[in-house]
Image: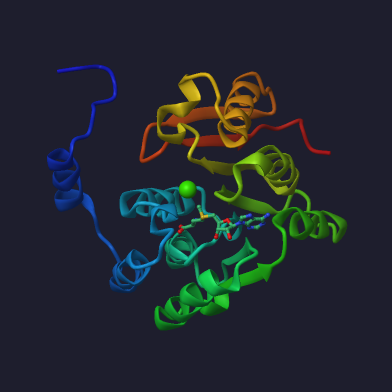
């Protein structure tokens, strides 16, 4: 018995999937289709997708943001969890990756919920702010270039309603964040983790699922 998070070896990980994973068949297909991609490791894990779907349902999310789509697994998991009138604004810069996603979103019958914006995510988020969408989103998932995470966090926080949730991926960076930073990505994640710890604008929880997922819930009184 332990009151610390367990080390998950392959055997225990498989057990977790065996007794808890309920993966939509098109999500499983998309995982298969992504496996052959050279950057397949960028895809979120299936139990993380299931957890995010749970969060989306728990907070009754309708309007969501996604920063970093790749082949569309997290967008598809989100779209399947949203109600029929729910929408995702999904940001990426790579049409080759997102075309794979689009085909699977169509196959799963949720393509109309996903508004893909192929442009640097900062531009898309700034445009939403300029259009007066601040305070109107329920959920945001940040999973793109790590050196811009703080830029994404600040913009997403502004775009979120009070009680809305930001989920920030890879905050443990394979354990590198706990060692002296050797590169810009690690340094950016370390700086954001430290900033979030002291950030009074949000309630905070760092989950040890997958590569670390921080949840930041927007508190009342910090609307701009
Ligand atoms: N969430 C995805 C999933 O479930 O499979 C994984 C996202 S992957 C880790 C990161 C993505 O961020 C890549 O598809 C990459 O093209 C995209 N990206 C990198 N820089 C970006 C930028 N400046 N603006 C928008 N997207 C960017
Ligand atoms: Ca990730």
The image position of residue 161, as x and y in percent, is 69, 46
Q: How is the image coloured?
A: rainbow
Name the one closer to the observer, 194 or 35.
35
The image position of residue 183, as x and y in percent, is 58, 32
Residue 95 found in image quarter = bottom right
Rendered view: 128 above or below 183: below
Left or right of residue 125, residue 144 in this image: left
Rendered view: 3 above or below 95: above
Q: Residue furthest toward the front?
A: 182
At x 46%, y 28%, the residue is: 176
Rendered view: 191 above or below 19: above
Total tally of numbered discs in the picture = 0
At x 16%, y 47%, the residue is: 14
The image position of residue 169, as x and y in percent, is 50, 42
Name the one closer to the observer, 83 or 51.
51
Quarter of the image that includes the C terminus: top right
Quarter of the image that includes the N terminus: top left
At x 63%, y 70%, the residue is: 116
Left or right of residue 31, residue 192 in this image: right
Rendered view: 117 above or below 214: below
Name the one closer to the observer, 72 or 188.
188
Left or right of residue 171, residue 153 in this image: right
The image position of residue 188, as x and y in percent, is 63, 32
């Amino acid at each position: 018995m332990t009151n610390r998070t367990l080390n998950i070896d392959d055997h225990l990980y498989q057990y977790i999937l065996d007794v808890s994973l309920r993966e939509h068949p098109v999500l499983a297909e998309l995982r298969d289709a992504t496996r052959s991609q050279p950057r397949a490791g960028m895809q979120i894990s299936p139990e993380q997708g299931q957890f995010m779907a749970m969060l989306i349902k728990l907070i009754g999310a309708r309007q969501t943001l996604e920063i970093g789509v790749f082949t569309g697994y997290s967008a598809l998991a989100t779209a399947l969890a949203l109600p029929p009138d729910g929408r995702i604004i999904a940001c990426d810069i790579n049409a080759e990756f997102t075309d794979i996603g689009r085909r699977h979103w169509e196959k799963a019958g949720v393509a109309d919920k996903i508004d893909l914006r192929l442009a640097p995510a900062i531009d898309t988020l700034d445009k939403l702010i300029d259009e007066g969408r601040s305070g109107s989103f329920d959920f945001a998932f940040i999973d793109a270039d790590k050196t811009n995470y703080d830029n994404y966090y600040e913009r997403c926080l502004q775009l979120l309603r009070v009680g809305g949730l930001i989920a920030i991926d890879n905050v443990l960076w394979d354990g590198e964040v706990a060692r002296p930073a050797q590169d810009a990505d690690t340094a950016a994640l370390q700086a954001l983790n430290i900033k979030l710890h002291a950030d009074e604008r949000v309630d905070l929880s760092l989950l040890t699922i997958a590569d670390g997922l921080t949840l930041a819930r927007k508190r009342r009184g910090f609307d701009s």
